[in-house]
Image (cartoon, rainbow, N blue to C red):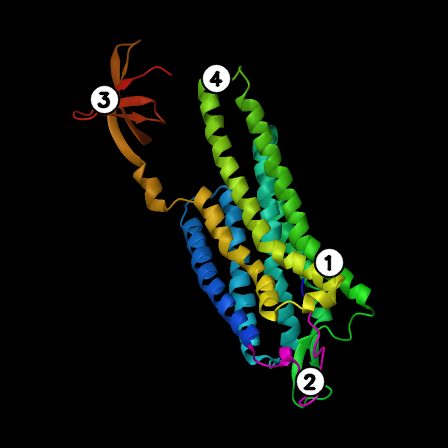
Amino acid sequence: MEVQSPWSSTNSTSGMTDDMRFTSTNVVSIACYSVFFIVSAFGNCTVLSLILRRRTRSRLTTMLMHLAIADLLVTFLMMPLEIVWSATVSWWAGDAMCRIMAFFRMFGLFLSSFVLICISVDRYFAVLRPMSLRDIASRSRFMLYGAWFFSFLCSLPQTVVFHVETHPEVENYTQCVTYHIFPSENTMMLYVLSGNLILYALPLIVIIFTYGSIIAEIMRRSGDDVFRRSSLDFLSRAKKRTLKMTITIVVVFFVCWTPYFVMSLWWWVDRKSATAMDPRIQKFLFIFACANSCMNPIVYGIYNIRPLHTRQQNRRYHHGTIRNAAHGHASKVICLVRWKKAPLHQDVCLNCKVTVSVGPVEASKVSS
């Protein structure tokens, strides 16, 4: 969570500080946010459209939809604000809009982090607590409602601490700042650190714990000799998939948010040395946290969402005959089946467990 204070060191000739001018730092900000805006808008809109086209949605895809919405709030509210603000340098939109935009500046980020927590907890219960699936649908809805509520609650203080101030020396220069709000530096530091802990530390801890527990359980089950061959094959695929997804999730979240978190700590612990860093690098480290909204649709989309036409290619209607060996008669069937190529020019029906020879359409029963 970032606070903004005005005119820290006044230039003796004009009364203008570097952050009150349009400099190369502003160019870096505009360029980075513009790139993130394009990537995030395309990725999240694509993920959202694929989910909405589905006739039915699982708990996971519902949560992915909320994640895409959260990232789109960051994309279409926060990023354009930062681009325009960097271009104008000062604040032109008045006090009310300053408070409103300060709220939405953080709301999407909080919501994205909280939905990531919901997804992690949902996967944890689905794998490690399968007997509780009876209540998992209501639990998932409750978690999503909680994510929206706590995002609103955590963003609400922004409408109080941010306001418009006019520069005491430079005429007609106004800025949306937190100046004169906090009674002491320690209070401001506590406010910033608490926000950073909620945005960064809490989701990271939950992600590591939940997916780490899933991996440990899958590895334990995979080594159990009492499991059947088919179960071992399934667990092997699940372990590989979960390992890839977990590593990607943790690395992306850590890489995107760690620079912001470290820079915030550095700024408040030793501001003198922090300000000695190139301001363009400082700005880039703060901006890079928004890259998480660009990466979320890529990470979760790759592992959980396939285009609709790809799924439909694996399904077709089959009109065939199943011969009942026990009663000696044939029955006509019409079923929606899922197909997998098998050797010897045969298709295997995975749902109905029938083998259909290529050529004359005839189905014969196979043993389970």
N-term-proximal mark, 4 vs 2:
2
Badge 2: residue crowd in 10 Å (few <14, some 14–19, many ≥20): few
Q: CA distance from mark 4 to mark 3?
A: 26 Å
Q: Position of residue 32 (x, y in %)?
A: 51, 66
Relative to 12, say whether 97 is above or below. above
Q: Foreground mark, 2 or 3?
A: 2
Q: CA distance from mark 1 to mark 3?
A: 64 Å
| Magenta extent | 3-23
Locate residue 94 relative to residue 295 in the image: left or right. right
N-term-proximal mark, 4 vs 3:
4
Q: Position of residue 191 (x, y in %)?
A: 75, 62
Badge 1: residue crowd in 10 Å (few <14, some 14–19, many ≥20): some
Q: Quadrant of residue 275?
A: bottom right
Asked whether the beta carbons under mark 2 and mark 3 sit within 8 Å of each other, the answer is no
Q: Is residue 125 magenta?
A: no
Asked whether the beta carbons under mark 4 and mark 3 sit within 8 Å of each other, the answer is no
Q: CA distance from mark 4 to mark 2?
A: 76 Å
- In this figure, which residue is indicated by the disc labeled 3? 344
Relative to 224, say whether 53 is above or below. below
Residue 141 shows in this picture: no
N-term-proximal mark, 2 vs 3:
2
Q: Foreground mark, 4 or 1?
A: 1
- Disc 4 is placed on an element classified as loop
Q: CA distance from mark 2 to mark 3?
A: 82 Å
- In this figure, which residue is indicated by the disc labeled 1? 193
- In this figure, which residue is indicated by the disc labeled 2? 11
